[in-house]
Structures are given as structure tokens and as C-alpha cells.
Image (spheres, grey):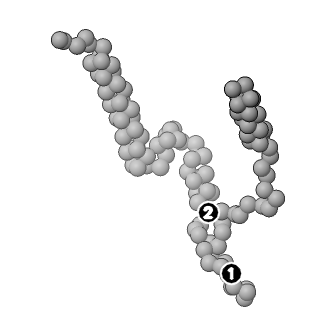
Amino acid sequence: TQILIFNIFVNLLVNFLQGLRSNIPSESPTIFFATPTKLVSESNAPVEYMGANKVPDLQRIFQASEEIPVHLKRGVSDRLLYRTTMALTVGGALYCLVALYIAAQPKNK
């Protein structure tokens, strides 16, 4: 039994040390952003990308110095999401309190 425990310990130690080993790949990873949707042929055809860069537009919206909180800057959809989240949060908290109250009541025999 001592040999079995020792073997298990050694196996765990080896697995732990292998997990600490650096697993850096030798080749660079593939690029996900701004990859063409179509393969570029050997001719010098223009590359068609997946979509336009929306980051500058969103930066302009969110960095504007207005009195609106950042989580409500994009209009009606943000307000709807915020209010729905708050309603679910308050409702869930009330549901938990009711469940705790019911669970705290002694059972009648």
C-alpha cells in the first residue's frame, strides 16, 4: 500500500509539473480580426473584409461629455435592458427572501 501511495504521489507531482511547463507554440496564431471573407487569388484583386470598424463611432458616443450615465448612452435599447436587469435583480432578491422565509418555518405534523 505504501508503494501504491508513493506511485500516486509521484504521478500527481509529474502531472502538476507538466502543467507548469510553458506550452508556447512555435508558430504564430492565426489572426481573427480583419481576416478576409474570401481568399485572395493570385491576381491583385481587392480584399473584401468582414465589416467596417465600429470602434471610432462607439468611442465618440461613449466619450462624449454629457450628463447621461455610460450604461444609458445608446438610447431606448439601453434603457430597456437596464430596466429589465434591475427588475429581474429586485424580483430575484425578493424571491430569495420569500424562499428563505418559507424554509425557516417549522413543518406542521
Q: Is residue 69 left or right of residue 31?
A: left
- The answer to whether residue 72 is above or below residue 27 is above
> Image quarter for residue 99?
top left
Q: Residue 97: horizontal and vertical position, in percent? A: 33, 21
Q: Residue at x 37, y 45 (%)?
A: 80
Three-letter amino acid code of the residue under disc 2: Asn
| Residue 94 visible in the snapshot | no
Picture quadrant of residue 81: top left
Q: Is residue 5 left or right of residue 107?
A: right
In the image, taking residue 93 as reference, residue 55 lies left or right, namely right
The residue nearer to you, when weighing 68 against 108, is 108
Along the line of sight, the residue nearer the viewer: 15 or 86: 15
**Mark 2 / mark 1, whichever is N-terminal:** 1
In the image, residue 44 above or below residue 50? below
Residue 58 lies, in percent from the top left, at 57, 53
Residue denoted by label 1: 40
Specify the farthest residue to the front: 1
Residue assigned mark 2: 53
Determine whether the residue tagged by mark 1 lies in a helix, strand or loop: loop
| Residue nearest the observer in this picture, 29 or 35 | 29
Q: Residue at x 58, y 42 (%)?
A: 65
Looking at the rendered structure, the number of numbered marks drawn on it comes to 2
Please indicate whether residue 97 sits to the left or right of residue 26 in the image.
left
Viewer-side label of 2, 1: 1
Q: Are marks 2 and 1 in contact (CB under 8 Å)?
A: no
Observer-nearest of 12 and 73: 12
Query: Mark 1 belongs to which amino acid?
Result: Val
Measured from the top left, where is residue 21 in percent x and y? 80, 43
What numbered label is drawn on residue 79?
none
